[in-house]
Amino acid sequence: MTRRFLLAADSEFCTTTAGIFHSGVIALCGFVGIFEFKEPLETARNRALEMSKMIRHRGPDWSGVYSNEGAVLAHERLSIVDVEHGAQPLIDEMAGRALAVNGEIYNHVSLREKLKQHHAWKTKSDCEVILYLYDEYGPAVCNMLSGIFAFALFDEKKRDFFVARDHIGIIPLYIGWDRAGATYVASEMKALDATCETIQEFPPGHYYTGRDRTFVKWYNPSWEHQAPTEKVSLQKLRTALETAVKQQLMCDVPYGVLISGGLDSSLIAAIAAQHRFKRIESGDTEEAWWPRLHSFSVGLEGAPDMRFARKVAEHIGTVHHEIVFTIQEGLDAVADVIRHLETFDVTSIRAATPMYLMARKIRSMGIKMVLSGEGADEVFGGYLYFHMAPNAQEFHEETVRKLFALSKYDCCRANKATAAWGLETRVPFLDKEFLDYAMSIDPADKMCPGKKIEKNILREAFPDLLPDEILWRQKEQFSDGVGYGWIDSLKDYANSKVTDEMMSIVERTFPNQTPTSKEGYLYRTIFDRIFQNPTACLTVPVGPSIACSTPTAFRWSQEFAKMDDPSGRAVRSVHLQATESV
């Protein structure tokens, strides 16, 4: 069954879906932390409350505050696990610690067994275990967690704080300092913009303590430092991804799947469709909260992704919903997208705008969590420029660079574009345990020289799960697949707003993080109107790109060196729908 609706008012949709969707509470979170402040506690507490309001869209279900002479933690909750309880900040009264978390800890049940002492549990929340693991293991808690997270913990007795972020930066986190030396952390930069003197992204895979005032890298996989040599096992690859998807279905509220019609999201959706049943005490199985699994796609009228997504949904048996947007609706949303994403990166804004519009519709149906396919291109070298990689060593090094930059690109987009409406996106391809295997594969097995299709081993691992036309479909950038007219219209709009004269003095106008195109100039102008802090722009990477490549890839091909456009169609030697000019 496919339901199709426009972003305009749709009374037919509202009536036909009545009673189908469970209207439970929402899922995602945001928090603000202030430490080492010298002002009165009441002043700091009131400031934290005002800052927290700026990220309430991330957690519209409930607000909570912890305040102490040494710290204030304000939390906005989107409840997904233990909906009735689990309000934050969480308090360990025995140890005198408070905790604010944005994230999901998938192995929280097994982690309870690693605790050696008695603890006074107050909730069934997956996050409460962090408090007690920290009590017993200290900073080693980070490596023990399987999940996505950013958290801030305050120790009343030691008057110290501990802040950490997940391995790849799937959950956003920023840190800043004011002129008086107080330290601030927040789930989104906008909460820090007017208060801090300096702001920076909290680095993924690191923790920070008030005592040492330094970032410590806790995530150190062996594949980061040397290319692996283990030949691929298609069965191990398949099992690892199925395990990642299955554990990320941990959810007590209605959820769905995103389907772009490409390989990555389609595989995640198909696996989720197979594992959407849960075992009950009698030994029988029952389907998750909804009677059916719902899937979603977005695009302009006639977009290539929509047609393929519909075929995937029919094949895996989901109730499918197509969100059709117009170019004008997309253009109208760009400023809001920049405000929520906190970036002026061209690739991110192109792709995030349709996702942002789609998320609003999904949230209106009572869904609080969706699974998506981000990360596969970084792990397996799926971007079309990987066809030009000169050898396995460089191929692997590029995948590593791409993975550790995701917090500024696809992770930022997937999280914030949906969090804008109180919707959580989970990304199984970036599961820590899945990465342990997928990145241990000999990069020679991943390479796609010449016309060999990218992500070949991933396709071969799932020959029975999808129709061949989906399984072997060529890579499309998401911003291309929603309709080729979308990117072309963005370029035209930017050309109408930014003149050649403006570009001739772009380095004087923007001496830091200088835009390299008219489209980038336009987005940077909007960004600077929203974010006033002079260090805010430094959180956004800038540089020429072709098909989402890094600068290193320009060495791989003369074709790259002549262009600056992140569209996959710019790779004329590979893309079947390549443009003649960019």
Image: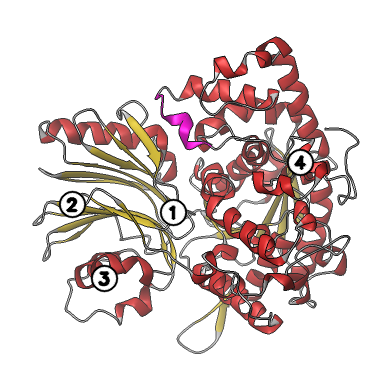
Q: Do the residues labelled 1 and 3 touch (CB within 8 Å)?
A: no
**Rendering quarter of residue 1:** bottom right
Q: Mark 2 points at which residue?
A: 211
Q: Name the residue under label 4.
A: 567
Determine crowd level at label 2: few under 14, some 14-19, many 20+ residues with C-alpha closer than 10 A.
few
The Cα atoms of the two marked residues, 1 and 3, are separated by 20 Å
Q: Residue 408 lies in magenta, yes or no?
A: no
Q: Say above or below: 485 vs 274.
A: above
Q: Is mark 1 on a helix, strand or loop?
A: loop
x then y, percent, for residue 265? 69, 60
Name the image quarter holding the C terminus. top right
Determine crowd level at label 3: few under 14, some 14-19, many 20+ residues with C-alpha closer than 10 A.
many
Q: Which callout, 2 or 4, points at the residue further toward the start of the chain?
A: 2
The Cα atoms of the two marked residues, 4 and 3, are separated by 45 Å
**Rendering quarter of residue 21:** bottom right
x then y, percent, for residue 349? 63, 36
For this orientation, the residue located farthest to the bottom is: 283
Residue positioned 66% across, 61% down in the render: 376
Q: Mark 1 points at which residue?
A: 204
The Cα atoms of the two marked residues, 4 and 1, are separated by 27 Å
Q: Do the residues labelled 4 and 3 touch (CB within 8 Å)?
A: no
Q: Do the residues labelled 2 and 4 touch (CB within 8 Å)?
A: no
Is 214 in front, or is 436?
214
Q: Residue 133 carries which label?
A: 3
- Identify residue type, mark 3: Leu
x then y, percent, for residue 213? 24, 48
Q: What element carries label 4?
A: loop
